[in-house]
Amino acid sequence: MGKFNGHLYPGLYLFSYGLYQATVLFKAMLASDSLLYASCPPRNKGRWARLWTISYGGLMKMVTGSTLTIYVVFCLDDGMVLMNKKVPPRFMYPKEWQHLTMFILLALNGCIDVMSKNLLPQRCVLLEKGTLVLILYVLLMLFISHVQGSAGIELQTHSLLILVVFLLMLVLTIELWAPNTFHLSLIENFLFLMMGSWLMQAGFILYRPVTGYPWQDDDISDIMFITTFFCWHVMINALWLLGIYGISSIWHHCYNPSLKLTGYEEGPYHMDAVGPVYKLLPEVEQSEKGDQALLFSESSL
């Protein structure tokens, strides 16, 4: 699991999660909705109506974390052995145990999200954010320990990944006191995209180079190009966010039902008699009665 697949599949999940969260964020921003309690589109009530209220982000975390946990357990021929039988005993597969810890935490985070959004009487945003921040703290410690004994290309690649995790941890920590802030949520989604794309890139750099030749640890140009590739990922992920915002904006202006409702409010006189014009009839009738009463009083005088 510590090879190519161990970087590709988690990176693909993190990148997909960042895209999904960015779509939700821009949708809430364009609709002037809350970032935490985004309203769902109206659906027909029926047998499957509850499906629209499920926390799909939490469900995706549970499925992905559980699948990767099962994979890392059965990918080793000897199984996940903690210690060997030698004297004195030694710990076995330290990196695989670290991967297993990461994936279990991901599944637990998904359980917390589903429990908060679908099982509790009232959603607890602080519980969701606090759990995610705690997981990022543990993940940062595991990544720092993960690079022990590394050098050259592997150390440079994982150091940039640790930088992204550290920045993401800071942003999520600040969000505990400002959870409904658009700018922080945008930076959070951008860092999730960076973490996912760079993790996939690390798998290709370390285990499957595009050229077919391994990167050289003693070549300073190879190490410098690692940072250059990282900067390219920054620009590409920023373009991803810009593209998602553009598509969401076009979709909002073309297919948002609320715009059609505002159109009817701006021109009520083009509606049928059963609309707003009909509601004015009692007022006209009352004014006519008032005029008749005034004429009657004048004639009596």
Image: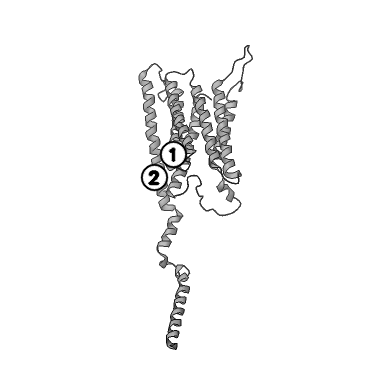
Would you say 89 lies left or right of 189 here? right
| Extreme residue in the bottom direction | 300
Taking 107 as reference, is 246 above or below it?
Answer: below
Would you say 224 lies left or right of 154 here? left
**From where the camera sits, is residue 293 visible?**
yes
Q: Secondary structure at mark 2?
A: helix
* Position of the N terminus by quadrant: top right
Q: Position of residue 255 (x, y in %)?
A: 44, 53
| Extreme residue in the front direction | 301
Q: Position of residue 292 (x, y in %)?
A: 45, 82
Kindly identify the amino acid type of the residue bearing the numbered disc 2: Gly
Residue at 52% over, 38% down: 129
Q: Secondary structure at mark 1?
A: helix
**Residue underneath mark 2:** 246
Instruction: Say which of marks 2 and 1 sits in front.
Output: 1
Q: Earlier in the sequence, mark 2 or mark 1?
A: 1
Instruction: Say which quarter of the image contains residue 234.
Output: top left
Assess disc 1: are there few (<14), some (14-19) or many (≥20) residues with their C-alpha within 10 Å of its C-alpha: some
In front of the other: 34 or 242: 34
Kindly identify the amino acid type of the residue bearing the numbered disc 1: Leu
**From where the camera sits, is residue 9 visible?**
no
Taking 16 as reference, is 263 above or below it?
Answer: below
Residue at 40% over, 52% down: 253
Disc on res. 65: none
Would you say 210 lies left or right of 81 here? left
| Extreme residue in the left direction | 221
Disc on res. 184: 1
* Position of the C terminus by quadrant: bottom left
Labels 2 and 1 touching (C-beta < 8 A)? no
Taking 108 as reference, is 37 above or below it?
Answer: below
Q: Position of residue 273 (x, y in %)?
A: 46, 70
Assess disc 2: are there few (<14), some (14-19) or many (≥20) residues with their C-alpha within 10 Å of its C-alpha: few
